[in-house]
Amino acid sequence: MNTMLTRKVPSKAERYFSTGVSLITSRGAKGPNVMAAEWVMQISYNPVLIAIFIHNGSQTIKNIEKTKEFGVNVASKDQTTEVNIAGGYSGSEIDKLKVKDIFQITAPKKIKTPMISGCTVNAECKLIRKEKTGDHVMMVGRVVYIEHDDTKNPLIYHKGRYFNLGSTIEQDRKEVQVSKETLEFFTNLAQGKFVLKCTGVLVWSTNKIMVTKWQKTRFETIPFIIPRTGENQRDRLVKFLNKTGFDIQVDSEPIMKRLVLKNTNKIQRINFVLFNGKAEKLMPNTTWKQKHRDVIARLI
């Protein structure tokens, strides 16, 4: 336990979360309103649902309850002033959307609540659920219209300060130069998927590894499968090996290999879940291959 961290921020740990900031627009008896909200998130793809979390008793809640709609305007890095005004004042104090030269209002497409331009995302929502959660109220909206601006970077909020997105962090993948034949083999298996997920078994004999030939292409590689989403990958691999006549004992400990296969300017990303295996002898349609000649084996 880090006693120094605990002593310094015993009641401020919740401030160490990093969030985006959205401008929530609504309308009511006093006209349109805007507030700033950190806790905004998409919670479904189909249908597209967005949940917003607002302090109980706010004018925005009353507005949404009455109109059954609201706007989610995800703030860009250029909108810190808008966020400060939207979050620093209530609608009962000033008409925030009428503050001179601050908010750029745009007409909605599917709802009657005004939206705000200059944001990274604008989503028009119809209320489908309201639920009290702790000291906030969760309001879930079904998106009826949404658009985004690729030229805008989102505003990030952390420890009471604003941040911009930094440089892209490349994922930790091992880049492997492979032959054109190897790249084409795995690219064809991927069928357009950004990442191909495979599960295979490694059977060693000194510095050689057991390989098998694929029936259609006669391409040689370790025995592996492309598992279905949600199924136990080791169990599926064992069933495949038994069904195809491989007498291999498969270990229980998985090995993860995240690869980028590359040939000239073409690549294919692969996640390989591997298990070490033991076999008393070679099975039909298998052979031993030098480790450095197999794209997966040479990474172990």
Image: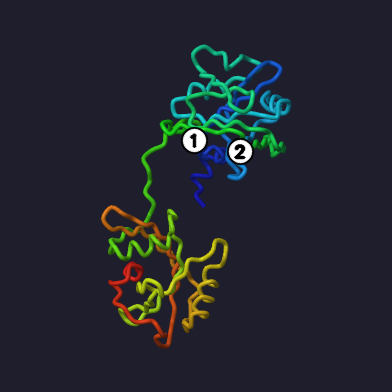
Horizontal side of 105 relative to 167 (left or right) equals right
Residue type of the residue flagged with mark 2: Ile
Q: Nearer the viewer, mark 1 or mark 2?
A: 2
> At numbered mark 2, what does the secondary structure look like: helix, strand or loop?
strand
Look at the picture and state if 98 lies above or below 125: above
> What is the number of callouts on the image?
2
Identified at 63% across, 27% down, the residue is: 111
Specify the label residue 50 is tagged with.
Answer: 2
Along the line of sight, the residue nearer the viewer: 97 or 269: 269
Tell me residue 247's x, y (percent). 47, 84
N-term mark: 1 or 2? 2
Along the line of sight, the residue nearer the viewer: 14 or 45: 45
Along the line of sight, the residue nearer the viewer: 47 or 208: 47
* Furthest-top residue in this view: 100
Residue type of the residue flagged with mark 1: His
Tell me residue 286's x, y (percent). 38, 81
Give neighbour class at mark 2: few <14, some 14-19, many 20+ (Cα, 10 Å): many
Could you tell me how far apart the alpha carbons at marks 1 and 2 are, in whole angstroms?
A: 22 Å
User: Disc 1 designates what residue?
Assistant: 158
Along the line of sight, the residue nearer the viewer: 106 or 219: 219
Identified at 68% across, 23% down, the residue is: 59
Horizontal side of 138 relative to 270 (left or right) equals right
